[in-house]
Image: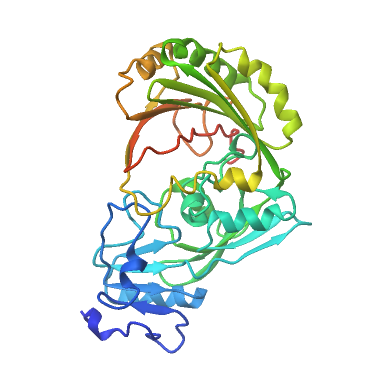
């Protein structure tokens, strides 16, 4: 096998390669292999920083020729660092981050290396959006191919539910378009069938007229009153209006319950009486944000280079016993727990064979992270 020293570091390996090729020890290599989770220290033999679809094709073919494992980087948020194959070839798409919006057709074309923030900013210029995560430096590709939760999921489904088509580089180095009409099996697979079907170099998304405002409402309860309030919050989640995503967190000696409303702020206030009815809080905060502020408010606490680790548990429902376990804790324990309401009509989340569920998680980092509870998507229309 050819050694990495034989590959040029900062010039194109082949005449038609427009990007950069990095090898261990060369300038930019260490920063290129660094990802969101500071615990990951993988060292690929080659990093191909692609500037075009043709570059991606070249990288895939070289990896096949040299029997190198391939990893693909967009935002680098995968907790286990799958974007950076140790001893393999990393395809870095971050230079391919263009977003183009058609406000009339309500469509967005998004290159495979784009961040969520770029998609949000481009769509919000026209008061449009699609389901995306809640940290703007997350890669669109990784989020979407993993399903894609976000504050719009209860109204419009997961990110993958809003994909109209994908342009894909296959393992053979071919470029194909996958949609409901072209390569439908591949299109199905890319939207939840598993992984490793190819490298998506462009997504086409369906956009929705959500406006540009949002509201976050939060009630704070001491732990000795939290169980009763959580039961009321659980019941509220089953009947909440679709623009609302119910959120819950237990941290220190307090429990915070509330909702995020993506859409008309005036309409959001109609839900406040129902939220207040779950109990007498020790504090209340209702804040209006622009949609872009909502989408970026977790950016700092979810920033790069922190050492990340957490656990999650799936439950058949958020029972009284589960609520009791969630709040029965030593307030001196700094570990943070979250409850994520998921109660879709029909009892099954889109793109999943799991029964209806709610989850709790224990999470730690080098500093206490902000809580983000999972939204509740609508049932998928996909067959």
Q: How is the image coloured?
A: rainbow
State left or right for residue 304 relative to residue 150: left
Tell me the quarter of the image containing the N terminus: bottom left
Please provide percent x and percent y for residue 140: 52, 55
Image height check: is 60 above or below 108?
below
Q: Residue 375's quadrant in the figure?
A: top right
Q: Residue furthest front?
A: 283
- Up the image or down, 368 lies above or below 83; here it is above
x and y percent of residue 245 in the render?
A: 59, 31
**Where is 19 relative to 268, above or below?**
below
Q: 110 left or right of 80?
A: right
At a point 32% along the width and 30% down the height, the residue shown is: 335
Percent across and percent down for residue 31 are 35, 67
- Residue ID at (68%, 22%): 271
**Residue that lies at the very extreme toward the bottom in this rendered image:** 15
Q: Nearer the viewer, residue 81 or 299?
A: 299
Q: Is residue 109 left or right of residue 67?
A: right
Front residue of this view, candidates 213 and 98 = 213
The answer to whether residue 179 is seen in the rendering is no
Above or below 85: residue 145: above
Q: Quadrant of the C terminus?
A: top right
Residue at coordinates 40% horizontally, 85% vertically from top-left?
12
Q: Position of residue 308 (x, y in %)?
A: 32, 45
Q: Is residue 267 visible?
A: yes
Q: Residue at x 33, y 20 (%)?
A: 331
Number of labelled discs? Answer: 0
């Amino acid at each position: 096998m050819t050694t990495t020293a034989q590959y040029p570091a900062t010039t194109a390996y082949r005449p038609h390669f427009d990007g950069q090729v990095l090898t261990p020890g060369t300038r930019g290599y260490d920063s290129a292999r660094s990802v969101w989770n500071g615990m990951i220290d993988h060292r690929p033999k080659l990093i191909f920083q692609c500037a075009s679809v043709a570059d991606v094709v070249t990288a895939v073919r070289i990896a096949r020729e040299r029997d190198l494992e391939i990893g693909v980087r967009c935002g680098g948020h995968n907790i286990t660092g799958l974007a950076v194959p140790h001893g393999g070839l990393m395809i870095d798409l971050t230079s391919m981050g263009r977003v183009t919006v058609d406000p009339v057709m309500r469509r967005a074309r998004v290159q495979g290396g784009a961040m969520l923030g770029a998609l949000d900013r481009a769509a919000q210029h026209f008061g449009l959006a699609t389901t995306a995560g809640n940290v703007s430096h997350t890669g669109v590709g990784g989020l979407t191919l993993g399903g894609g939760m976000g504050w719009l999921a209860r109204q419009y489904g997961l990110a993958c539910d809003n994909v109209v088509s994908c342009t894909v580089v296959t393992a053979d180095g071919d470029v194909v378009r996958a949609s409901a009409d072209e390569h439908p099996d591949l299109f199905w697979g890319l939207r939840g069938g598993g992984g490793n079907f190819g490298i998506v170099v462009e997504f086409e998304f369906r956009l929705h007229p959500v406006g540009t405002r949002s509201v976050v409402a939060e009630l704070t309860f001491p732990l000795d009153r939290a169980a009763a309030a959580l039961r009321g919050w659980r019941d509220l989640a089953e009947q909440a209006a679709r623009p609302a995503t119910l959120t819950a967190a237990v941290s220190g000696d307090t429990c915070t319950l509330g909702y995020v409303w993506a859409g008309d702020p005036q309409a959001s206030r109609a839900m406040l009486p129902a939220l207040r009815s779950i109990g007498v809080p020790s504090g209340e905060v209702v804040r209006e944000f622009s949609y872009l502020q909502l989408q970026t408010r977790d950016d700092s606490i979810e920033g790069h280079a922190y050492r990340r680790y957490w656990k999650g548990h799936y439950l058949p429902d958020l029972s009284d016993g589960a609520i009791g376990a969630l709040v029965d804790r030593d307030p001196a324990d700094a570990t943070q727990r979250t409850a994520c309401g998921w109660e879709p009509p029909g009892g099954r989340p889109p793109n999943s064979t799991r029964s209806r569920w709610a989850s709790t998680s224990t999470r730690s980092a080098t500093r206490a992270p902000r809580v983000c509870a999972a939204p509740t998507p609508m049932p998928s229309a996909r067959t």
